[in-house]
């Protein structure tokens, strides 16, 4: 089942905020394109109103009063000022249009759910009924229950600023807190690992949000109620046993405000246990959850889990839209002719050298005008990363003795390759670079042509006459 067909809350909010046809991809693209074009440059106009708000004010189908839009805009601006209050000038946060939109969607939702929860529930279910009647083949929406209104999720690409949205959500919740039934007993940020815990602590501090690691030696006694307590999902357990640093979920009984960063990080069995524990501590409170991989994680999940998140994902800005907006990385997938043997070290080394040459080309272009790339386009010096499949990559023939075999890891293979490049024995490196630039690598694509014949345009122009200058 395509999980995107279950995004009921996303669909409802897109309609509220003016998308003419939420099922037509071209309509959705035009909607975002308008913000991308009309809300560029400075985030605010001369009167202090965000450009995103000004665009929303001109969209006829937005079913929110102008007074409310301006109120939400003021709130977001005040929260952003809090986030920037202790940051030096060069580190000041300026929201992009999609971060503003996520803020507007959240403002609307928190306003409605705290003002009249039953009215919001009625509107959501009327939307579900209308969609199932008119677009049965396009949606798999489920009706909302009151308990569904206590969880919001954000499906946003890596690099799109999920952490900043988390900080904004913290201040937004604090703003609407007087209209909730009661203040939370705990504010928890649940992370997938210790590394992200430490990273979150640093970033929360920069945004003026008090935080404390739950398992610090000095404990949590006496800290302020608005303090965020951080803990890894792996430290939560059903029942505390022994003297380890695990924490029983019963410690957090009551009304909790929960922030969950990338909760879908374990195996299927692990995730089901973790989700049960998270649900136990958030049952009587409110949850915000953030992930770049809801699509991959939930496409094969049970229908009940898909429904739960379909009714919780408030804002979807996954990688395809992120990439369409000019962010993320461009990628180049090489389709090779079948039955080519990449266990052959010569061919593998040629392929790796082509990768190294492509990286060099990027470095060369960047070096021609690094200041412009950085100051105008915010592009940093290119970086090359190799990712191995496993620590132990398998067995290969040794050069030490005939028929002797040893295990070589991916890292070792890479080091041996780099050693071969630097040594340039018998002119292998220079000769292979020449073949790559001439489209004579010997590695064929699915159509039989050399897979690198159309690559390295800059290097061909600059170095074709003297390869040694590379």
Image (cartoon, grey):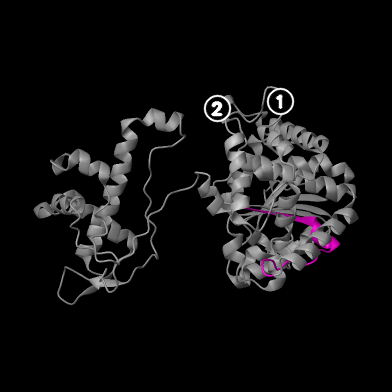
Q: Is residue 97 above or below residue 81?
A: below
Q: Is residue 340 above or below residue 437?
A: below
Which quadrant is home to the N terminus? bottom right
* Disc 1: which residue: 48
For this view, does 287 lie left or right of residue 177? left
Question: Residue 459's spot in the image, x, y percent?
Answer: 23, 42
Q: Residue at x 16, y 68 (%)?
A: 400
Q: Is residue 49 magenta?
A: no
Q: Residues within 10 Å of mark 2 (few under 14, many from 20)?
A: few
Cα distance in 3D space between marks 2 and 1? 21 Å
Q: Which of label 2 and label 1 is nearer to you? A: 1
* Disc 2: which residue: 90
Q: Residue at x 79, y 59 (%)?
A: 127
Q: Residue at x 57, y 64 (%)?
A: 296
Q: Mark 2 vs mark 1: which is more N-terminal?
A: 1
Which quadrant is home to the C terminus? top left
In the image, which disc is placed on residue 464? none
Nearer-the-camera pick, 16 or 413: 16
Q: Which residues are magenta?
A: 137-155
Q: Residue at x 71, y 41 (%)?
A: 59
Q: Quadrant of residue 34?
A: top right
Question: Residue 176's spot in the image, x, y percent?
Answer: 83, 42
């Amino acid at each position: 089942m395509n999980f995107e067909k279950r995004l009921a809350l996303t669909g409802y909010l897109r309609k509220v905020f003016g998308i003419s046809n939420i099922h037509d991809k071209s309509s959705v693209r035009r909607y975002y394109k308008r913000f991308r074009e009309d809300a560029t440059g400075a985030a605010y106009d001369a009167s202090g109103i965000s450009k995103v708000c000004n665009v929303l004010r001109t969209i006829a189908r937005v079913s929110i009063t102008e007074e409310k839009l301006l109120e939400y805009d003021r709130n977001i601006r005040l929260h952003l000022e809090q986030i920037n209050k202790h940051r030096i000038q060069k580190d000041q946060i300026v929201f992009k249009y999609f971060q503003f939109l996520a803020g507007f969607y959240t403002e609307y939702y928190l306003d409605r759910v705290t003002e009249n929860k039953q009215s919001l529930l009625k509107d959501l279910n009327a939307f579900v009924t209308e969609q199932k009647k008119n677009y049965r083949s396009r949606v798999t929406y489920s009706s909302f229950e009151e308990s569904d209104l206590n969880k919001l999720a954000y499906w946003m690409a890596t690099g799109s600023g999920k952490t900043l949205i988390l900080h904004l959500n913290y201040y937004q919740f604090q703003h609407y807190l007087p209209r909730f039934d009661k203040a939370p007993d705990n504010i928890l940020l649940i992370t997938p690992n210790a590394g992200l815990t430490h990273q979150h602590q640093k970033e929360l501090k920069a945004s003026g949000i008090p935080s404390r690691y739950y398992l610090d030696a000095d404990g949590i006694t006496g800290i302020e109620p608005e303090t965020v307590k951080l803990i890894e999902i792996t430290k939560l357990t059903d029942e505390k046993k022994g003297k380890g640093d695990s924490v029983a979920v019963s410690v957090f009984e009551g009304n909790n405000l929960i922030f969950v960063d990338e909760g879908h990080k374990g195996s299927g069995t692990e995730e089901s246990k973790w989700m049960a524990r998270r649900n136990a501590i958030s049952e009587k409170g409110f949850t915000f959850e953030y992930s770049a991989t809801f699509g991959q994680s939930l496409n094969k999940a049970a229908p009940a889990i898909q429904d739960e998140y379909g009714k919780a994902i408030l804002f979807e800005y996954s990688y395809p839209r992120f990439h369409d907006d000019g962010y993320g990385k461009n990628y180049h997938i090489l389709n090779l002719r079948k039955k080519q043997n990449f266990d052959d070290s010569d061919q593998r080394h040629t392929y790796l050298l082509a990768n190294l040459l492509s990286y060099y080309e990027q470095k060369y272009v960047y070096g021609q005008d690094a200041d412009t790339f950085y100051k105008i386009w915010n592009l940093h010096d290119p970086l090359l990363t190799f990712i191995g499949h496993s620590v132990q990559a398998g067995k290969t023939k040794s050069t030490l003795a005939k028929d002797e075999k040893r295990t070589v890891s991916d890292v070792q293979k890479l080091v041996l390759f780099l050693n071969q490049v630097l040594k340039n024995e018998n002119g292998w490196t220079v000769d292979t670079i020449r073949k790559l630039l001439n489209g004579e690598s010997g590695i064929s694509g699915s159509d039989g042509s050399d897979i690198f014949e159309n690559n390295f345009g800059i290097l061909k122009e600059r170095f074709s006459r003297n390869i040694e200058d590379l």
